[in-house]
Amino acid sequence: MNCPSCISGSLNDGKYLCTLEDYRVVDNSDNLIWIVQTHDIQSDDEEINDSTNIKYCICKYWET
Amino acid sequence: MPDIGKINSVAIGSISKVNNQTFSDSFKILGITKAAAGGTATNFLGQQSNWVASSGKAGLGFVPTGWQTNTTDTVFSSTTADRQWTSDTGGTTPSSGTGPTAGHNPLQGINGNGSEGSSTVDYIYTEATSQFNKRMLLRTPELDFTNALSNNTLKLYFWFHMFGSNMGSLGVAATDNSTSAGDTTLGLHFTGDTTGGATITFWDDNSDDGSSTSSAVRISGQQQTAGHGSTSVDAHWRLGVVDLNSLAGQSSVYIWFFGKTGGGFRSDMAIDDVLVVGEE
């Protein structure tokens, strides 16, 4: 499936993940694709390590 | 005289009352009076789509000129707010599984649909990360309804987004007090977390056209079943409407939005394109 944003790229399966330092897009092996934004959430917060499945393009478009 | 079956598409046989007077079978109608005098359509609060502060900043506590979100403001009785609303410059809220994909498309008016705008269309929301079961208050600038007609045209319209498995509740009140949503003078004040305030009639499914609505003093729990990166109709914004007819003639009115987050981080509720219209 082509990316609706850049058209030329393709959509890949991945995850939107909250880590200790940031919200990031990773592939299904948890390899960093890009950092969405940093945060200052406490390490014991329930949101840390939470993730949802997404599709992403290397142009930094993602969708659920 | 020909037999008249309808007036303004209403079957005469279905009319049982005029001016609240009930007809008996032999009653004769000598004249039909318009229910209320029409007036000039007026925006008492122009559509508020841009949520950055006058300084150009967005984020926790930043609101447009005249709006207010303070933790010192009263929600009800002696209970004050716990936290401020957060303005967002567009796109999703940070946490997954909650919040909209972007602000409501401002080109869709109150007769339009709930589609989201581009990723730069902003909105304001209750950031719930590490802020569970928190009360957040937001109010409009002072509104002057002195010349508003009491003909049932004075209404508040707002688009809302409540996606998230921990979603809390959203209420609307109106008072004449700039620092209290619990002031009793106008009779539309909050009396508790789930009580008091105005009745909201709101879209309650994903029809995206207002064909199905509910009415309550709080919109409670998850409403949309998608958001945060989804552009499906399930993620579209929904319209809320509040009848402000009882406030016609009031010279000083503040409308309050009370969001109370739920017990987890998936409780980012958002509002956008707030509008108050009526006739004067």
Image: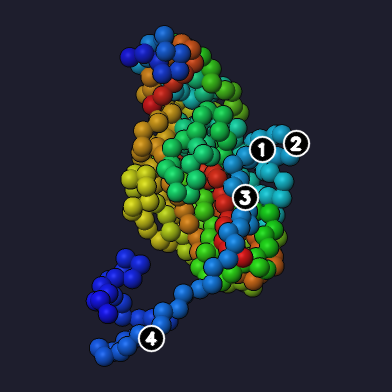
Question: Vertically, is B199 above or below B118?
Answer: below
Q: Chain of mark 2?
A: B
**Reading the chain from its start, which is encountered first: label 3 or label 4?**
4
Q: Which mark is residue B46?
A: 3
Q: Chain of mark 1?
A: B
Residue B204: x and y in percent read: 36, 51
The residue that label 4 is drawn on is B30
The alpha-carbon separation of the residues under discs 2 and 1 comes to 8 Å
Report if residue B132 is visible in the image: no
**Reading the chain from its start, which is encountered first: label 3 or label 2?**
3
The alpha-carbon separation of the residues under discs 3 and 2 comes to 20 Å
Q: Foreground residue, B109 or B196?
A: B109
Disc 2 vs disc 1: Cβ atoms closer than 8 Å?
A: no
The residue that label 1 is drawn on is B52
> Which three-letter amino acid code belongs to the residue tagged 3?
Gly
The alpha-carbon separation of the residues under discs 4 and 2 comes to 62 Å
**Location of the N terminus of chain B (image quadrant):** bottom left
**Reading the chain from its start, which is encountered first: label 3 or label 1?**
3
Disc 4 vs disc 2: Cβ atoms closer than 8 Å?
A: no
Instruction: Look at 39% across and 81% down and name the residue there.
Output: B18
Report if residue B102 is visible in the image: yes
Q: Is disc 1 on the same chain as disc 4? A: yes
